Image (cartoon, rainbow, N blue to C red):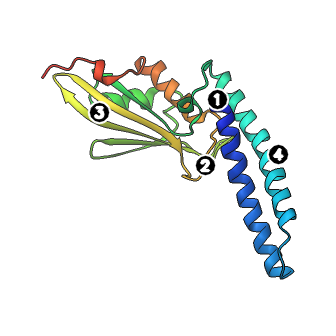
Amino acid sequence: MNPVLKLYLKIAVRAGTTFAVLLLCSDLILEGTVYPLKILFFFVFIGVIYSIATVSFHVEKIKGLGVQNLTDAALKSTQIRRFCLDMKEVELIEALLNDPTFGGMSLSKKGNTIRLRSGIEGESLGTMITLTLIDEREGAYVYEVKSRPRLPTVYLDYGKSLSYIMGFERLFGPSGDVSEVQLAS
């Protein structure tokens, strides 16, 4: 099934179900009875309207980032990539702090994980980026970069996480399949 169509359906079902359950509860509490056709109508109507409005905007933002092939992975609000760099954590932190995009974020470090948090922006309530050192051998460091909305309930981030991953690729070079990277043992 087409990934965009699948996303339209997921959002329609989630929004419609949420509204239908709230409507069902309010009907039971206020009127003491349930009207199945009313519930079904609002399930479909609200789900379709909400889905068309939000998914269309999400897809346009992702296409605006230059993504031509809209896959399930490109449409997700959580983006994960691996980067093989020749930078230690201290150098990586310095490069992030000097970058105009990532320098304005709050940065914390705990163990082998660096966490960046953006503030509230026009289209989101913030993004959390974690960089985890997962492998280190003879000057080659493999970092897993995960960008996701700060709130775990957010299903559409309108391309924000993908734009941050693209910012990492701009700053450090393209991400790749780390299994292809030959690390000396």
Q: Position of residue 165 (x, y in %)?
A: 49, 29
Q: Could you tell me which residue is drawn at 52 percent across and 24 percent down?
A: 166
Determine contact: label 1, label 4, CB under 8 Å. no
Q: Of marks 3 and 4, which one's residue comes earlier in the chain?
A: 4
Q: Amino acid at mark 1?
A: Asn
Residue 49, numbered label: 4
Residue at mark 3 to residue at mark 1: CA–CA distance: 40 Å
Residue holding disc 1: 2
Q: Secondary structure at mark 1?
A: loop
Q: Position of residue 63 (x, y in %)?
A: 67, 23
Q: Of marks 1 and 4, which one's residue comes earlier in the chain?
A: 1
Give the number of the mark in front: 2 or 1: 1
Q: Position of residue 119 (x, y in %)?
A: 58, 45
Give the number of the mark in front: 3 or 1: 1
Between residue 173 and residue 88, name the one nearer to us.
Answer: 173
Residue holding disc 3: 89
Q: Of marks 2 and 3, which one's residue comes earlier in the chain?
A: 3
Near mark 1 (Cα within 10 A), the count class, few <14, some 14-19 or many ≥20, is few
